[in-house]
Amino acid sequence: MYQSFRIERNGGASIGGFTFVEILVVFAVIAIMAAISLAGISRYGARQQHAQIVAELKSGLTEARSKSIASLEETTYGVYIGTSTIEYFSGASVTPGSAANQIIAFPSGIVIDPSLTGAATSVIFARISGIPDVSGTIDVIDTRSSATTTITIYASGLVE
């Protein structure tokens, strides 16, 4: 049905070529491979963002506890979990969005669902002992990659 075109030289030897259909097939295969690769790279990026938020939250909770145990500046420290931010603060209570807070916004597609005692949205660690005012779990959910990580805050103050 399809023929390869051959160009003849003066000596009568011919040079082989590719048909248009063969070239289209190669381009189609390359396009399919590129689409599969891009989807994998996108999921990898989402998983990395999820892991970064989990590490940031764990680190912030541990740091707040450590500062409270050290009684740094003779105050307590805590973490507030908002709808689109995590805020690190000092003092016995939190004022969400305060300029004194260290605010970390998390990307869209990340949902943080705290299940703390008393339906609390913040954790404050006691001076010297480091015991939290609430305990429970915090689920970090990535809706893009369906990944979920649970962080547990024990009554002793341990964060896992």
Image (spheres, rainbow, N blue to C red):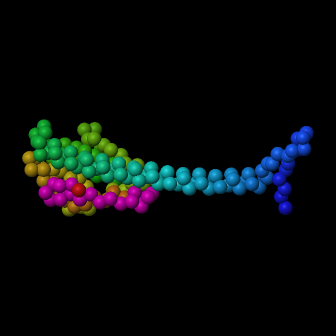
Give the total of numbered labels: 0
Residue drawn 11% across the image and 42% down it: 70
- Image vertical order of residue 102 relative to residue 110, above or below: above
Q: Is residue 48 left or right of residue 101?
A: right
Task: Answer left or right for 112 relative to 126.
Answer: right
**Which image quarter is the N terminus in?**
bottom right
In-image side of 160 versus 143 (left or right): left
Give the quadrant of the C terminus.
bottom left
Q: In which quarter of the image is residue 110?
A: bottom left
Q: Nearer the viewer, residue 134 or 53?
A: 53
Residue 95 in view, yes or no: no
- Please provide percent x and percent y for residue 119: 24, 61
User: Of 27 and 69, which appears nearest the observer?
Assistant: 27
Q: Residue at x 21, y 45 (%)?
A: 63
Residue appearing at x 19%, y 43% in the figure: 90
> Is residue 8 a member of the stretch shown in magenta?
no
Q: Position of residue 23 (x, y in %)?
A: 73, 51
Task: Kindly tell me whether residue 16 is visible in this rendering.
Answer: yes
Q: Does the magenta stretch include residue 148?
A: yes
Where residue 30 appears, x then y in whole percent?
64, 52
The residue closer to the viewer here, 124 or 144, is 144
- State the image coordinates of residue 60 (x, y, percent, origin top left): 25, 46
Q: Residue drawn at (28%, 41%), measured in percent from left and top?
A: 102
Q: Give the range drawn in magenta.
A: 142-159
- The image quadrant that residue 91 belongs to is top left
